[in-house]
Image: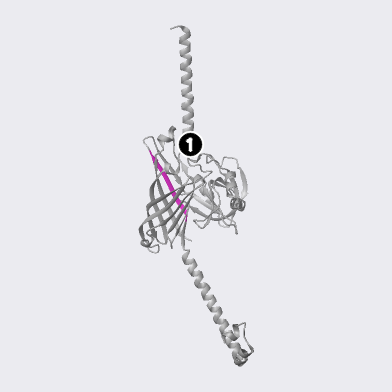
Amino acid sequence: MSNKKKKIIKIGAIVIAAGLIVGISVALYLWNLPHRDVQGTATDYELTTSELVTEYINDWDNANAKYLAEDGRSKVLEVTGTVVRVTENFNGQKVVFMREEGDKAGINFTFLPEASSNAEKLNPGQVATLKGVIRSGVYFDKDLEMFVHAVVDNADLVADNQ
Amino acid sequence: MKRAFFSKSTSRHDINIMRVPSDKLKTNYFRMKTNLKQTIILSTLFLLSVTAFSQERLVSNNTHIRFFSSTPAEDIESNNYASTSTINLQNGNVVFSVPMQSFEFKKSLMQRHFNQEKFLHTSEFPTARLVAKITNLSEIDFSKDGEYDAVVEGDLTIRGVTNSIKEPGTITVKGGKVDATSKFFVTLADYDVTFSGGKPSTNIADKVEVTVHAEYIKE
């Protein structure tokens, strides 16, 4: 085997090995891709509970197009409103429901497990600003015969009035 | 008497024959007015109570819906805790509204795939729905503690595609609280969720197990 052939085989082997390493690295990265750090993500919209509720009731399609992303990495919101109640879901996460008097619906904020203590600080009637990622908006469901509240997940407390 | 007070065509003759002492007339008039008021109030109360009774229903904002897929390649699980459901106690109607982007996966990449156009297309179809009826409602006593078998029949809509389903469930009544659970299988292809190749075609089962748990309170 000539030196030239040996050189070509050597280069080919290096290219194939490099390709394999890059391919495996990318696959491993994607496989172990961390979940989105919602609290560490810049806020897309700052608004009030009433503003979000009204926007959805007025034009559900447009609001969905504005807030929901195709890959599920939807808009990160900071919402200011009045706390109505704090409950716990089947996963042990705190759920803070905010709604303004006279509004047809409100927003359920499911808190991150590590932010539970912040949710526990909140009391009914208190005004607070919460941050999280929107999962679904407000709409009137004719079968449920009621307005369905908006859902915001991975939430945490940004500010309160106390 | 009635004609003298209410008829628009009261004639002079009528008035003459109805000539009675004015005090007595006033007393009778006010007595009738009072009776009429009482009748109206009682009728309204009756109508309101009938309406309230006919609309009596249970509402749940505390729910858990789990998808589970098992293949030789891997097991995939996803959980959703943000659905809303109602049970109408009069006609047995059961409704679930499920926000699809609230499904959480262990792997972030799976969550992204799940939401994308090729899979559930959740930005276009943000909610899945079940509109069904408990067909054996008469066998369930929502006012008495116990565990009751239920049969739920209706329409399940996922990704904008609706199919009829008939599944068993269990309703547990305990101390004024009502819990509903059910486990059934969904064939993904029935809802236009198909994979022609690649990892999803080998790693996601054709049929996924769906587990539902909802805790209801009276509205």
Please state if B200 lies on the left or on the right of A82 as rendered: left
Q: Nearer the viewer, residue B138 or B71?
A: B138
Give the letter of the chain under mark 1. B
The picture places residue B40, in percent across and down from the top left corner, at 54, 76
The picture places residue A154, in percent across and down from the top left corner, at 52, 45
Residue at the spot of label 1: B109
Asked whether the viewer can see residue A76, the reply is: no
Position of the N terminus of chain A by quadrant? top left
Count of labels in the image: 1
Q: Nearer the viewer, residue A83 or A52?
A: A52
The picture places residue A84, in percent across and down from the top left corner, at 55, 56
- Quarter of the image holding residue A101? bottom right
Dot 1: what SS?
A: helix
Please state if B56 lies on the left or on the right of B168 as rendered: right
Q: How is the image coloured?
A: one colour
Membership of B211 in magenta stretch: no
The picture places residue B204, in percent across and down from the top left corner, at 41, 38
Asked whether the viewer can see residue A4, the reply is: yes
B86 above or below B209?
Answer: below
Q: Residues within 10 Å of mark 1 (few under 14, many from 20)?
A: some
Q: Going by the picture, which residue comes out furthest to the right? A: B12
**Main SS class of the magenta portion in the image:** strand
- What's the amino acid at mark 1? Leu
Please state if A77 lies on the left or on the right of A1 as rendered: right
Residues shaded magenta? B60-70
